[in-house]
């Protein structure tokens, strides 16, 4: 018999044996993917921003299908409309979530917190945070180096050259939370957008005692507690020398804003307040005149 023919037969036999082994292994360990994953993934925006808490939209879709629920799973980019579409694919009901937006809880601008030191080094907030308190001396205030702006994939932020603080564009913000994670001092927070985008919050995160906090920034919260006392809805708490307003309890009455002695509480998208008219003179004052 021809040796070449023998070799071909042997090699062919070996190939068939290995093919059979591979086929058997594939059948045994094959992973059947739920077709709903593709259907859900097609609905997602594909931003892969991580705002949902997963590495990407595909991972998020897999989590939804695996859990058979939308509880605790929300895409901030797509919002409630997207949740409703995904719920329809899954045969579930999606609960509407209050729209949120990122807010900067610091007013330590060049004017409010004049520079006492000059930082020379890597232009990164994360790096500067480990080395010094900040140009104005506030150990909790904005460092102004723009890590948050760099982290935003939606061009929803920029650094204001006049104030040295980041500015968030509400209409562009998708509340993905990237800027929140990027800030080493946690001055950026996701808050409820509020009716007609009206919001009230304490724009300060400094936990130093009043005199020290105000020395470093004239609009710092001094922990006086006046806002807590005047709030009729128990929406404000005071902890570690710092007031905090819970947006889910706040009724936007604005009493705390006018009560704050330093201007640490800000009101957004409200109409201008009417000028307070001169108080009517008492009878005693009229008689005196």
Image (cartoon, rainbow, N blue to C red):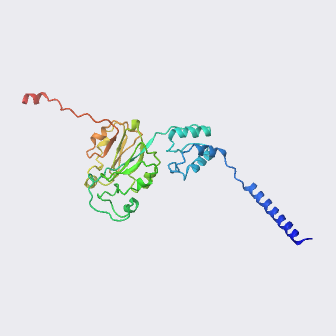
Please tell me which residue lies in front, 161 or 279: 161
- For this view, does 25 lie left or right of residue 70? right
Q: Quadrant of residue 181?
A: bottom left
In the picture, which quadrant includes the C terminus? top left
In the picture, which quadrant includes the N terminus? bottom right
Please tell me which residue lies in front, 79 or 243: 79
The answer to whether residue 183 of the structure is visible from this angle is no
- For this view, does 99 lie left or right of residue 256? right
Place of residue 228 in the rendered image (x, y in percent of width and height, measured from the top left): 32, 42
Q: Quadrant of residue 194?
A: top left
Q: Residue furthest bottom?
A: 3
The answer to whether residue 194 of the structure is visible from this angle is yes
Q: Residue furthest right?
A: 1
Residue drawn 14% across and 29% down? 282
Q: From the viewer's perspective, is residue 232 above or below residue 46?
A: above
Please tell me which residue lies in front, 277 or 1: 1
Q: From the viewer's perspective, is residue 28 above or below residue 248?
A: below
Residue drawn 82% across and 65% down? 14
Please tell me which residue lies in front, 99 or 22: 22
Q: How many marks?
A: 0
Place of residue 129 in the rendered image (x, y in percent of width and height, measured from the top left): 37, 60
Place of residue 93 in the rendered image (x, y in percent of width and height, measured from the top left): 57, 37
Place of residue 112 in the rendered image (x, y in percent of width and height, measured from the top left): 27, 51
């Amino acid at each position: 018999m021809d040796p070449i023919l023998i070799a071909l037969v042997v090699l062919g036999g070996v190939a068939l044996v290995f093919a059979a082994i591979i086929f058997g292994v594939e059948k045994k360990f094959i992973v059947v993917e739920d077709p709903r994953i593709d259907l859900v993934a097609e609905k997602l925006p594909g931003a892969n921003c991580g705002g949902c808490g997963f590495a990407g939209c595909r991972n998020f879709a897999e989590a939804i299908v695996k859990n058979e629920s939308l509880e605790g799973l929300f895409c901030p980019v797509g919002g409630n409309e997207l949740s409703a579409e995904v719920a329809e694919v899954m045969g579930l009901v999606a609960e509407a979530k209050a729209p949120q937006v990122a807010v900067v809880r610091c007013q330590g601008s060049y004017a409010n917190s004049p520079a006492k030191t000059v930082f020379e080094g890597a232009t990164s907030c994360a790096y500067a945070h480990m080395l010094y308190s900040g140009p104005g001396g506030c150990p909790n205030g904005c460092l102004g180096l723009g890590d948050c702006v760099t982290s935003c994939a939606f061009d929803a932020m920029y650094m204001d050259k006049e104030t040295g603080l980041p500015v968030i564009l509400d209409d562009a913000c998708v509340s993905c939370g990237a800027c929140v994670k990027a800030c080493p001092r946690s001055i950026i927070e996701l808050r409820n957008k509020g009716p007609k985008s009206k919001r009230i919050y304490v724009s300060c995160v400094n936990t130093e005692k009043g005199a020290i906090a105000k020395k470093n920034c004239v609009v710092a919260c001094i922990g006086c507690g006046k806002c807590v006392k005047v709030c009729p809805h128990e929406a404000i708490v005071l902890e570690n020398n710092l007031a905090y307003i819970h947006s889910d309890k706040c009724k936007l009455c604005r009493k705390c804003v006018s009560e704050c002695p330093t201007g640490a509480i800000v009101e957004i998208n409200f109409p201008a307040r009417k000028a307070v008219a001169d108080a009517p003179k008492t009878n005693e004052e009229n008689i005196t005149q």
